[in-house]
Image (spheres, rainbow, N blue to C red):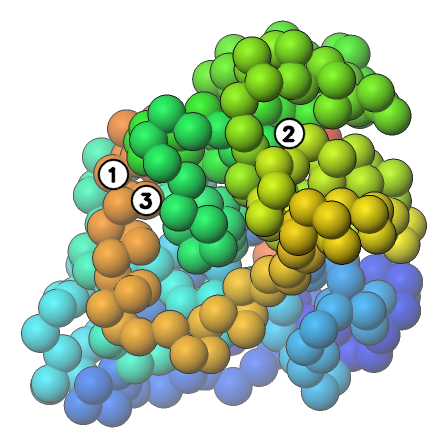
Amino acid sequence: MKAVQVVAFGRAADVVKLNEVLDVGSPGPDEIVVAVEAAPINNSDFMIIAGRYGYLPSPPATLGIEGVGRVVAAGSQVRNLKEGDRTLIPFTVPTWTERVKFTASWQRALPDNADVQQLSMIGVNPATAYLLLTDFVKVPPGGWVIQNGANSATARAVIAIAKSLGLKTVNIVRREDVVDEVKSVGGDIVLLDGPDLAKRVARETGGAPIQLALDMVGGSSALNLMNCLAPKGVLVIYSAMSGQPFSGSALSVIFNEVSVRGFWLGHWGKTATDEALAGMYDHLVPMVASGAISAPVVGTYRLEDFSQAIAQAAAFKGKVIFTPS
């Protein structure tokens, strides 16, 4: 069985290899074996390869943090899935390989008429977007959420999920050429970032209070979001794409009681119950199946073509997906 693995930490061109690995074998009574159909490349994978992620496996280790596939064998005690069903692969199971084996708990059969590539991307970005909107602040229906990096895959999911929850979004971008793109996927307000952001947001929203801000950029962009928050608002930091330390306002924290929180799906997953996972995906899967949540795919590759796949994904111009089966 083949797998794309990291054999040390460093430059992808030097440390990522296609290796022969042991087959996963037969499932235990409560396990399933899944043939991987589609497994995306995420920014997190690049961070793992570079040795800069919150969790680092011991090399050689198979890469990939999400994916989807067909059940090819099911244990005697598995009741929620059968051979031939398509299902999500948990984000704790490396996916850049041909087959995986795991305990079947919250997983359900996915709709066959849904786009398999879009389904393969549900485990990280849409899940993160859903939790950012539901786990920190209870924004009332009709309320506003503000986010930066609004043309990213996670931010696009935030826009769609916010609509499904009856919320409105202020979407901040750093390039004029993506404004129309973000509007086309449903962003209610789309603005360029800048030090005067708070004044422009207040004008566009009619001064509506904003209790939740989502930062994936860092640097001064985080400060600009913080300045848009109402008293007791929450800034949630879930990525740092700029590579810069985030800036904040001590005055906002002290006098407006604005708080700063961090979010990492890996931490949430450690304590998430089967009920919480099933409930989240019950909300997300129909949205992906209908096309309400989607991300642009720019390339699909066999495992054998991993070098080209990683090179294209590193341009961050859209999703690249491995199709092992």
Residue at the disc numbered 2 = 150
From the viewer's perspective, tell me whether residue 161 is left or right of residue 249.
left
Which badge, 2 or 3, comes first in the chain's sequence? 2
Inspect this view and state whether residue 21 appears: yes
The percent position of residue 91, horizontal first and vertical second, equals 47, 66
Q: Residue at x 29, y 65 (%)?
A: 276
- Compute the Cα span from label 3 to label 1: 6 Å
Q: Amino acid at mark 3?
A: Leu
Circle nearer the viewer, 2 or 3: 2
- The reply to whether the C-beta atoms of the residues labelled 3 and 1 are less than 8 Å apart is yes
- Compute the Cα span from label 2 to label 3: 19 Å
Q: Amino acid at mark 1?
A: Pro
- The reply to whether the C-beta atoms of the residues labelled 2 and 1 are less than 8 Å apart is no
From the viewer's perspective, tell me whether residue 225 is left or right of residue 153.
right
Q: Amino acid at mark 2?
A: Ala
Q: Residue at x 43, y 56 (%)?
A: 135
Residue at the disc numbered 1 = 286
Q: Residue at x 29, y 86 (%)?
A: 26
Q: Residues within 10 Å of mark 1 (few under 14, many from 20)?
A: some
- The reply to whether the C-beta atoms of the residues labelled 2 and 3 are less than 8 Å apart is no
Q: Quadrant of residue 15?
A: bottom right
Residue 7 to residue 140: above or below: below
Q: Furthest residue to the bottom?
A: 28
Residue at the disc numbered 3 = 284
- Compute the Cα span from label 2 to label 1: 22 Å
From the viewer's perspective, tell me whether residue 116 is left or right of residue 46.
left
From the viewer's perspective, tell me whether residue 244 is left or right of residue 235.
right
Inspect this view and state whether residue 213 appears: no
Q: Quadrant of residue 254?
A: bottom right
The percent position of residue 16, horizontal first and vertical second, equals 77, 67
Q: Secondary structure at mark 3?
A: helix
